Image (tube, rainbow, N blue to C red):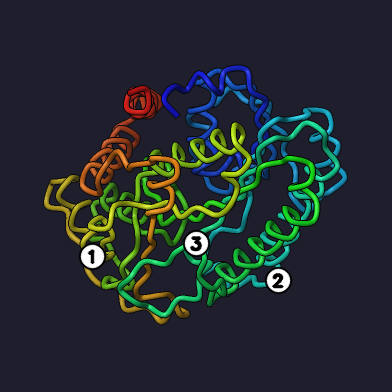
Amino acid sequence: MSKMSFWNGKKVFITGHTGFKGSWLCKILEKSGANITGYALEPLSQPNLFDLCKPNVSSVIGDILDFDLLLSVFNKVQPEIVIHLAAQPLVLDSYRKPRYTYNVNVMGTVNIMECVRQSDSVKSLLNVTTDKVYFNQERSEGYREDEQLNGYDPYSNSKSCSELVTSCYYNSFFKQKGISVSSVRSGNVIGGGDFSENRLIPDCARSLAAGEVIKIRNPDSIRPYSHVLDTLFAYLLVAQKQYENSTLSGAYNIGPSENDSVSNKELADLFCKAWGNGAKWECAHIDNPHESGLLKLDCSKIKRVLNQIPHWDIKQAVNETVAWYKAYFNNENTSAVMLGQIEEFMRFYAN
């Protein structure tokens, strides 16, 4: 993706556009001149990034489980590129609401696949899943795209099922129609504007803004953390390249460089250092359901096949995230911060 001009005038359909990643994605594509239609529930949190950044998008508020509404919007728009983000994305919530999690993450995927199956306009489809789709043996080596899928908890497992749905529709319907399809399995993303509950970075920002000590569960757990912009520009790279060459369909791990997989306590240390003002964290002894202690991705495929290289290392990713939250809590212009960070990535990808 040497130039973002590819996206100028492209009709893009995004599910889950009102969420954290969806809001950032809409702003990138808006800046790139795309014609964006979003389909999602109302933003789940107050405050939320979607209302703060106000992207220029044709926004339809609807449930991914409402197939009739979804199909009617889809048929009206006739998109060329579909990016499926809509999900129940939280591990802890999946323990509390497993049936709902499976409905949204599996049947929601079936619904968007059915819309694409009945369409003659779609050329490129991206299903956004997670690093947690793998059967995790908590080994030190990163998982490759051809390894076993079988997530442990309801969230992770439902995303594994979503991958199987995607593969089935590709083999049964899309391959013959020339529709390119990929699943993108990204690690944990950080960045300004995430207000979700029970996520490390939003919890850090809220605590420090309130003058409190950060409480961290599972401080020794290791995850592949990346800035949201590194992740989203990788999504767009896959969507573009498979649009241009259908043989590039498949599954792609998306994550940081090997040395940027860090523990929660290391991430908290970086956040506190960037925040300053004596920021501190401590371990919270909470009896939570099982969460993986060690999870790494092997991201060599996307680097080898598509020449994708992360732009920001973990330290800069944290610094840029802190800059956004400080602007927010100081009542400064967060849209300017967001746009500046997007423009930095666009310059990087223009080279």
Is the residue marked by circle 3 packed among few (<14), some (14-19), or many (20+) residues within 10 Å? many
- The amino acid on which the numbered mark 2 sits, given as a three-letter code, is Arg
- Residue 192's place in the image compared with 287, above or below, is above
For disc 2, the marked residue is: 99
Q: Of helix, strand and loop, which one carries label 3?
A: loop
Nearer to us: label 3 or label 1: 3
Q: Which residue is mark 1?
A: 265
- Counting residues from the N terminus, which is met first, the one under dot 3 or under dot 1? 3
Compared across the picture, whether 316 is left or right of 136 comes to left
Q: In percent of the image, x 60 and y 44: which residue is there?
A: 247
Q: Earlier in the sequence, mark 3 or mark 2?
A: 2
Can you tell which quarter of the image residue 342 is in? top left
Identify the residue at image location x=54%, y=73%: 148
Alpha carbon of mark 2 to alpha carbon of mark 1: how far? Answer: 32 Å
* 137 relative to 243, above or below: below
* 180 or 77: nearer the viewer: 180
Q: Which residue is mark 3?
A: 145
Residue at 72% from the left image edge and 34% from the top image edge: 60
142 lies left or right of 9: left
Which comes before the other along the chain, label 2 or label 1?
2
Q: Amino acid at mark 3?
A: Glu
Category of crowding for the residue at label 2, using alpha-carbon neighbours closer than 10 angstroms: few (below 14), some (14–19), many (at least 20): few
Q: Which SS class for mark 1?
A: helix
Asked if residue 173 can be seen in this view, the reply is yes
Residue type, mark 1 in image: Lys
